[in-house]
Amino acid sequence: MTWRQKQNLRKLELSTKVMLKKDSDAELFSPSSEEYITAEREAKSGEQARLKETQEQYRVLDRNMLRKINLTHALESPQEELNRKQAITADIAKEIGKRKLY
């Protein structure tokens, strides 16, 4: 079970407790309760951490792509160089396409 699924399950459990409690006890588990607010904050901070991790992965990927492009091959013919650059460009286009899916 992923972290996000666990957080969603926790929120569901909290909202279920609200429905099951009597009116006098319902205030303890309402959306304004401290426990609910804490769970909400944890969910937001986890989402931000995941976003930073994804951005770092893309930075590493971008650096690797730039290194590929900047490689020089002294023994390449002009046609081989063109083919290599086209392959790298296609790789970059695929990567950009993947990013748009997220």
Image: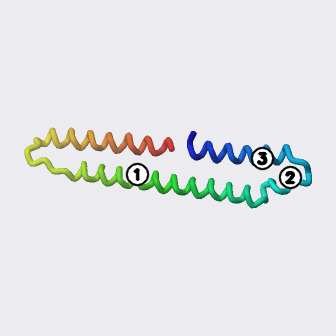
Q: Where is residue 42 in the image (x, y as percent from the top left)?
A: 62, 56
Q: Is residue 69 above or below residue 34?
A: above
- Quarter where residue 81 is shown: top left
Q: Where is residue 27 in the image (x, y as percent from the top left)?
A: 85, 56
Q: Residue at 13% x, 42% y: name it.
A: 78
Identify the mark nearer the N-term, 1 or 2.
2
Tell me if 99 is positioned left or right of 44 in this view: left
Amino acid, disc 2? Ala
Q: Residue at 48% x, 56% y: name it.
A: 52
Q: Is residue 91 above or below residue 34?
A: above
Tell me if 35 is positioned left or right of 45 in this view: right
Q: Which of marks 1 and 2 is in front?
A: 2
Q: Position of residue 12 (x, y in %)?
A: 73, 44
Residue on which the image places disc 2: 26
Residue on which the image places disc 3: 15
Q: Is mark 3 on a helix, strand or loop?
A: helix
Mark drawn on residue 57: 1
Q: How crowded is mark 3: few (under 14 residues within 10 Å), some or many (20 or more)?
A: some
Pointer 1 with pointer 2, Cβ within 8 A: no
Gap in angstroms between the C-alphas marked 1 and 3: 35 Å
Mark drawn on residue 95: none
Amino acid, disc 1? Gln
Gap in angstroms between the C-alphas marked 3 and 2: 10 Å
Q: Residue furthest bottom?
A: 34
Q: What element carries label 1?
A: helix
Identify the mark nearer the N-term, 3 or 2.
3
How many numbered marks are there?
3
Identify the mark nearer the N-term, 1 or 3.
3
Amino acid, disc 3? Ser
Front in this rendered view, residue 73 or 38: 38
